[in-house]
Image (cartoon, rainbow, N blue to C red):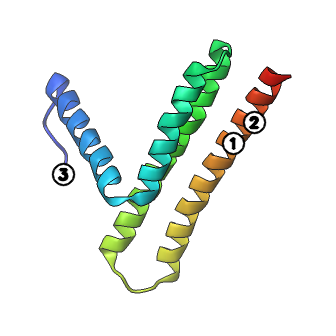
Amino acid sequence: MASNTTGLLRIVKAAGYSWQGLRAAWQHEAAFRQEATAAIIAVIIACWLDVDTVARILMIGSVVLVIIVEILNSAIEAVVDRIGQERHPLAGRAKDMGSAAVLLAIILALFVWIALLWSHLR
């Protein structure tokens, strides 16, 4: 399935596939919609707060990381579901691990926000 497309056309096509992936995540994944909405609000708050540039980048970066991990988790779930709907321990493990990765990303984002807001408000 290797493509012979190179150069600028390859970049344009890759951007199109990425856009399709974001649209699919928004259309088919409620968790993605919830986390994306929370991320947009968090980015607005991070831009509104009077914090230094590094703190702002950490705050925004931590919520973007949650979105990235959620997209990867959704991709894992889609592939597992495509393979079959029957219960299998490995399929369950793959889905659980993806979910655990999302949870860890959310916990990391919360720690970053709490630490930075705590230091800012003191």
Amino acid found under the numbered disc labelled 2: Ile
Disc 2 designates what residue? 114
Q: Marks 1 and 2: CB-CB under 8 Å?
A: yes
Residue farthest to the bottom, as pictured: 86
Amino acid found under the numbered disc labelled 3: Met
Distance of mark 1 from mark 2, alpha carbons? Answer: 6 Å
* Disc 2: CA contacts within 10 A as few (<14), some (14-19) or many (>=20): few
Amino acid found under the numbered disc labelled 1: Leu
Q: Choose mark 1 or mark 3, whichever is in front.
A: 1
Q: Earlier in the sequence, mark 1 or mark 3?
A: 3
Residue farthest to the right, as pictured: 122
Where does the image place residue 76, in percent across and percent down from the top left? Answer: 42, 61
* Disc 1: CA contacts within 10 A as few (<14), some (14-19) or many (>=20): some
Tag shown at residue 1: 3
Instruction: Name the residue nearer the viewer: 85 or 6.
Output: 85
Where does the image place residue 49, in percent across and percent down from the top left? Answer: 64, 20
* Disc 3: CA contacts within 10 A as few (<14), some (14-19) or many (>=20): few
- Relative to 4, say whether 60 is above or below: above
Tag shown at residue 110: 1
